[in-house]
Image (spheres, helix red, strand yellow):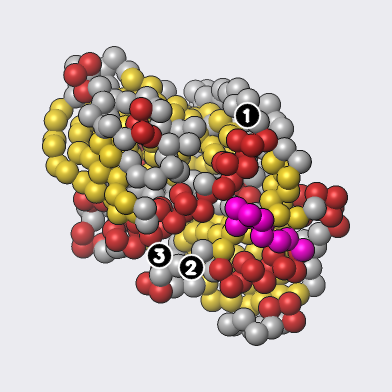
Amino acid sequence: MKITSFLAGLLSLTVASQAELMRINLKKADITPAEQMLAYSETGAYMTQKYFGSVHRKMKADEANQIIGLDTSGKPTYGVPLSNYMNAQYYGDVSVGTPPQTFSVVFDTGSSNFWVPSTHCNSIACFLHRRFDSEKSTSFHPNGTQFAIQYGSGSLEGIISNDNVEVGGVVIKGQDFGESVKEPGLAFAFGKFDGIFGLGYDTISVLGVVPPFYNLVNQKLIDEAVFGFYLAQADGSTGGQMTLGGVDSNHFTGDLQWHDVRRKGYWEIDLSKIQLGDEEVEMKAGAVIDTGSSLIVLSTAMAEMINKEIGAKKNYAGQYTIECEKVASLPEFSFFFGSTKYTLQGSDYVLNAGGSCISGFMGMDFPESLGDLWIVGDVFLRKYYSVYDLGKNRVGFAPSK
């Protein structure tokens, strides 16, 4: 890594041709500034759970199911609308069972399992959310295999079940999914979502359960093994949209720039350089593109240096805050994925929570097994439309509009 002054001393398509692309505007949650701050403060706990859990899962291809053959046989693209929880959580609705039981889920490229709370769950988080009742579904098939996803604050425990899952207007037949019977910590309790809809590679799926997107492809329900994300700003009329089987050119400008996946687990691409103002740092790192993360997460030491450079200071809750009147004069921050530069303004990487301005750079100490890693979340993805191509193992970006 080449070190420059500000880090001295410190060693991450167009719309598919069809008429059934769904576009639905959703209402946003009406929450107080205090609730906004809570949403951001819980990000660290959730991220620790999520990525420390991934260490326990371990990305071993021989433990995962074989990748399902891809098919491009003329099926339509479907759109899934997203709700924006004050730039902290994006989520949309899916349903499970017959008749359908609806759940709000985070469409998460940083994990690979689909799970929702169960009526058998007695954790506080489950009682605060909708729970799946297998006895009310005529298409339910019991499996009963126990699973546990190890997190920093405990385990999310449950059983594997099988039922029909509807997403974006299409029904996946016989999808294996998790019914959680125990949910740890407060991150899930305070979330506006009920569960998680993992969109990562099957190599990090707990118990090798085939992720729903693989089954969308395998059952020939979509045109291409591609999905796209548009994440709107908090003051927009909608939360955003996810498309399945193609992308929506109405939500980006110019051409998509593609970057190969470096490890088939997360949607991880090469991060070759970062730039803050005029200062550059060359890197050999991985950038995980994570729709289920609110912020940009990097090593604690580097986060401290960057936040110091932009004038952000830790508050009582451990968040980096900055005076809101200074945001307009902050330097640009840029990622270089390969040779392509992607730039954020201060107003992009600083989040306004009811008059309190919070830095979008959060520090976390990653286990050595993950290597030099950055998690690139919604702070970046609101600025750039993102596309995930499972067939060609690549991620694409274009400026959002």
Kind of residue at disc 3: Arg
Kindly report the distance in space between the C-alpha atoms of the residues bearing marks 1 and 2: 31 Å
| Circle on res. 31 | 1
Q: Is residue 220 magenta?
A: no
| Circle on res. 263 | 3
Reading the image, the residue beneath label 2 is: 365
Residue 5 appears in the picture as rendered: yes
Task: Tell me where the magenta segment starts and ends, as one range.
Answer: 311-320
The quadrant in which the N terminus is found is bottom right
Residue 218 appears in the picture as rendered: no
Task: Say if 267 sits above or below 15 in the image.
Answer: below
Task: Say if 123 sits above or below 253 in the image.
Answer: above
Helix, strand or loop status at disc 3: strand
Main SS category, magenta section: loop
Kindly report the distance in space between the C-alpha atoms of the residues bearing marks 3 and 1: 38 Å
**Image check: 109 left or right of 238?**
left
